[in-house]
Image (cartoon, rainbow, N blue to C red):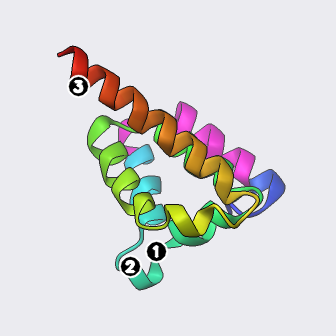
Amino acid sequence: MSQHKFASNVVDKCLTFGTLEERQILIDEILGTTDETEPLQVMMKDQFGNYVVQKVMETCDEQNRELIISRIKVHLNALKRYTYGKHIVARVEKLLAAGERVSASS
């Protein structure tokens, strides 16, 4: 659903307004069960899916954010070649920089 123009908006709203439990179900689905079947990889390169990935990083808890970022980091160089992947790269780099500033001030 995240790769469809209108359905991705529904997923976006579910992430924004869903309960913690509902949000976790969506995150688990996005992360998949193995690296080979990871929907996250496809979504990061997709015109609409990349916005859903960004919304997940914005709305999830710190533990899930760290997990998602660690999965994305593996693909950062490859994502730079995709028009829509560049959005994910920029968001991850921004989050990593913000995390470094927080760590340095602690």
Question: Which SS type dominates the magenta stretch?
Answer: helix
Identify the magenta region. Answer: 8-21
Which three-letter amino acid code belongs to the residue tagged 2?
Asp
Whether residue 19 is visible: no
Q: What residue is at 55 percent from the left and 31 percent from the top?
A: 17
Comes first in the chain, label 1 or label 3: 1
Local crowd size for mark 2, using a 10 Å CA cut-off: few (<14), some (14–19), many (≥20)? few
Q: Which residue is mark 1?
A: 38
Q: Is residue 36 left or right of residue 46?
A: left
Which three-letter amino acid code belongs to the residue tagged 3?
Ser
Q: CA distance from mark 1 to mark 2?
A: 5 Å
Q: Nearer the viewer, residue 21 or 29?
A: 29
Q: Is residue 57 left or right of residue 67?
A: right
20 inside magenta stretch: yes
Residue 40 drawn at (x, y percent): 51, 65
Front of the two marks 3 and 2: 3
- Marks 1/2 in contact by CB < 8 Å: the verdict is yes
